[in-house]
Image (cartoon, helix red, strand yellow):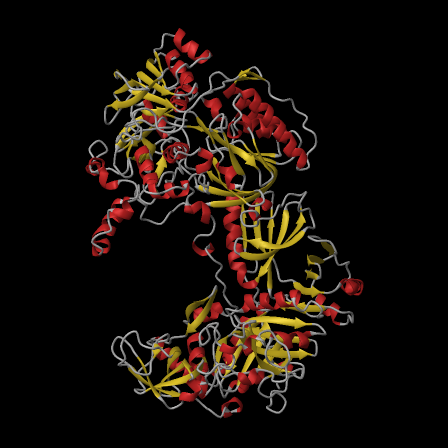
Amino acid sequence: MTESFRIAGRGRLSSRTARFSFDGKPYAGLSGDTLASALLANGVHLVGRSFKYHRPRGILSAGAEEPNALVSVERDAARKTPNVRATVQELYEGLSASSQNRWPSLAFDVGEVNDVVSPMFSAGFYYKTFMWPKAAWKSLYEPVIRSAAGLGVAPDLPDPDHYAARYAHCEVLVLGGGAAGIAAALAAAETGVRVVICDEQAELGGAMRYEAGAAIDGQDGWAWAQASVAKLAAMDNVTILPRTTAFGYYAQNFVGLAERVTEHLADPKGLPRERLWQVRARRVILATGAIERHMVFADNDRPGVMLASAARTYLNHYGVAVGRNVGVYTANDSAYAAALDLKKAGVGIAAIVDLRDNPAGPLVDEARSLGIDIHHGRGVVGVGGKLRVSSMTVQPKGGGAARTIPVDALLVSSGWTPSVHLFSQSRGKVVFDDATKRFLPGNYAQDCVSVGACNGTDSLSATLDQAWAAGAKAAKEAGGSVARGTKPKVESGENFSGGVLGAGPGAGADKTVKAFVDFQNDVTAKDIRLAVREGMRSIEHVKRFTTNGMATDQGKTSNMHGLAIAAETLGKDIPEVGLTTFRAPYTPVTFGTIVNHGRGPLFDPTRRTATHDWAQKHGAVFEDVGQWKRAWYFPKAGEDMHAAVNRECRTVRETAGLFDASTLGKIEVVGPDAAKFMELLYTNPWEKLEPGRCRYGIMLREDGFIYDDGVVGRLAPDRFHVTTTTGGAARVMNHMEDYLQTEFPQLNVWLTSVSEQWAVIAVQGPNSRKIIEPLVEDIDLSDEAMPHMSVREGKICGVPTRLFRMSFTGDRGFEVNVPADYGQAVWEALWAEGQKHGACAYGTEAMHVLRAEKGYIIVGQDTDGTVTPNDAGLDWAIGKKKTDFVGIRGLTRPDLVAPGRKQLVGLKTKDPKTVLEEGAQIVANPRQPIPMTMIGHVTSSYWSENCGRSIALALLAGGRERMGETLFVPMPEGPIEVEICSPVFFDEKGGRLNG
Amino acid sequence: MAKAAKIATAARSPIFAGREFSADGAKIAVLAPSHRLALRAPEKSLAALSKALGLKLPASPKSSVTKGSRSALWLGPDEWLVIDDGGKDPLEDCARVKVLHSAVGVSHRNVGLSVTGPRAAETLNAGCPQDLSLAAFPVGACSRTILGKAEIVLLRNAEDSFRVECWRSFSDYVLAFLTDAATDAA
């Protein structure tokens, strides 16, 4: 198909053809086109259907603010991107795009019925239409709304692209690469400081893309921009980021940029699709420009209705005429410039309709001199055509005879809205300028400055003066030298005045027409008035009730109109009604960009111990414990988990087992006040613990509840080796450091994490000593020399060890600490010795069962942050003579000493084969009506091979007073009868610790 | 107790020893084991400790002192990481020092990696938020910081060469992250 709307000799694109398809139909465009400009070159305006009413929609803009032209771009089965703005998507050879929100076809869409029955979908319809009958919500309304809602189809395969990230620092960050941004960057860069400048377009230049009247330093505006960019690119201290959107402005000049690296390439060649830049800048220069607004009139959403500056961009940059007989409807001078450019390019201008009574100025004069009809003091009150505008109906503002003028495109402009989004995100406060009816940057909250159109500066020469000064000042404040370069000289520029906010003639409060304010969310002027009538007073409420400005375009073209209509209906001034808050992101950012490198294995660190490979080779099944992979159990051929765990539990008690306990947190507490510090952090007494001995310690929070526990060995008078739970390692270290620095800074003691310095191999069971003995030198392992709960330093397998005699199984046991790189070899040596005694390797599941048989708690499983030492039966671990430790006052709180608290008990099911479910509730009477009074819950429950029955631990109200009582655990299949017993199920006297 | 002579000495298995990755402009390598000391001490002890360690412990933030095969990295007002690549354990050097201090051996806790080449800084900046320009992070600068979701200690030992120290079990992640980042930075 030929590009019938491309005008020879116009535009700046190369002549290289790029073929593409839209809705399956092949087209040709030029390299450098956007999808929108290429479609327009082929005469295609209709590109989509609207969100709510499924109305045909065209291309409104030529930039990031586009609310209508949202399409799906498909590279392959996995790379389908919905809601791509055709005005932003650059054309590449083979691009395949399709329209959205239509079925069966774009031109004939069944969903269009929504437009006919639109009274059902008035503003706030969610809250009203679907209220009755109540039952219908779940079965009917919600499913239907869910399937109808949304725009575009999400891809259903994993994203095969990769994404990248970069932190960057600079002295001056310039957001926006129009004439203002370029001038600011030039001034700053000349001083030698680091400058980063980004722009969302493929090439920097901003409004120079269409402003044919600009001339700077003897060149036209666009040529000056490109020459200046080339100059910047040659400087080592400048980073230029095109195709990069500044989407978020965070605290302390931290700005998020999304760079689209390969979206414009036919072949991405292994490059990341997008790159997230997180930039910290000493000074930020906001040169974000302004966005043109549409006119609000009946059926203003017809394809072919387009912003005047967009039509001008398509002509002057892309060489595309948006029609052959173009109408213009404006209240602002800038549309005249578009009409003049088109006229000069040979495009017919049907008429300019100007809402103003007496438009004047050189542009108006020139239009008149070129013979263009100007209808002033009139408005467009309607349009003809459905899939494409075919005429405009013009009527005097005050009413009167209407006249229909045929057009094939209608350019609109109601003025320009400064882009204060990023300024507002920086927490700066905007102020309303009544003379020009626009919000402008007021008080700044961060080290930034606005220049050019976003600052309300209208003329090009004032803009460049301001931008150059701002760039030089920012650089100087950030440590740069004095700017050496020469300020760009503006020979001519464009300067527009005029503009109007709100609904125009024919779309007033007395009309029921659809005059769109927000195209993307299908919000009309009528909807906003309805919201006010229904009681919404704040613009924030109006926004949410109507959804005006809540679409992905964030109301870039609609907010000011919506605000003006609300203010008018309320009878208030615009500043009184206020502006809604601007939030990041400025334009949509992909999840891929946010996540960047953090996919797959890099989503979160996976931590493995020194014996991981050995365990894997020996068939271990692993479980995730935080970031750690821990061996869960070691099934032999033919064993299921149950069989393996039963065997492991039996073997440990019969002979011995090896267990990797390396993930336990370990903290070395060193200094002359180490014991004093330990006294303050733990409930137990430590001063009198002799070097070489260990103690089970409990740590509380201030509120008196158990925070962590672990065995602590005293290596020397001034040195403790503290162990913590696996999950508690980092937070216990932080907790200790917090108290040391803020509460006890007078103590001479330091904390060092040694969790990863030591691999820990637990050797547990009656034969444990026999297994380690042949490998240990210079440590006497006899019960007399090294009793239960002692620690020695020496050597095992010729390498240093901290050898603990301790037990988490209730049987004789040791924990062998060796420097981590030796962990694997020492494990293998112990394994070889263990084989002589029939020992096994056991995993975390058997470890859990074995400790439960002894009633040893696991913090976080048998406690939940509301359990005191007394509740857990651990009163013995509180130093009775101690006068201070963290949590000592918490423990005396009335509710912590009141009777009836939940206490740790054991449960035996009446049927020994029944294993309770962890988390199940306990009741006294299972026949009571629901909801039952729950008096406790199961915290741990296992089949115990060693006990030959099921065992469980529970927290039960007044539990220790209930020994021997029968209670019930209600389950869906019926209540389970349980007997309350001691939490120690195995070897109650504890003789096996030395057995 | 067994006789020392009869016991086979356990072999050391450093994690990812010798692992390397090269991209255009950046090379990642896992370094051989080093001796490491986590040293904590008040200011008044620094002279004695410096003497024992054979180098002057740095006193200003983000700085390090290297002498021969030994470096001392300032991590906090009373905290240093001492790394010795020459086989001499700084923990032993501190053993006889009587002044107030805490010396804890962490040789096996950390794994060292090198990131070298003209794109080394960009590679690190994929996950490290620090300003790694030569002005802000000159040769010899060091910092305890982050790389993606892992804590690292970063030392610049030449204009285009960095040493990354991370905990042993994070080295898998850090190596994979740097590999991914180097590919993009190239």
Q: Is residue B67 above or below residue A783?
A: above
Please provide percent x and percent y for residue B149: 52, 56
* The N terminus of chain A lies in quadrant: top left
Name which residue lies at 24% across and 49% down: A130
**Left/right of residue A890 with respect to residue A59 in the rendered view:** right
The x and y percentages for residue A716 are: 69, 78
For residue A271, which quarter of the picture? top left
* In the image: residue A785, left or right of residue A406: right
State the image quarter where residue B152 is shown: bottom right
Q: Could you tell me residue A240's position as x and y percent?
A: 54, 33
Depth check: A258 or A478 in front? A478
Asked whether residue A239 appears in the rendered view, the answer is yes
Quadrant assignment, res A83: top left
Q: From the viewer's perspective, is A961 left or right of A528?
A: right
Furthest-front residue in this view = A571
Q: Position of residue A710 (x, y in %)?
A: 55, 77
What residue sits 68% from the left and 42% below the top? B135
Note whether residue A265 is visible: no
Position of residue B67 relative to residue B23, above or below, is below
Task: Establish if A398 lies above or below A276.
Answer: above
In the depicted structure, whether residue A325 falls above or below residue A232: above
Q: State the count of labels.
A: 0
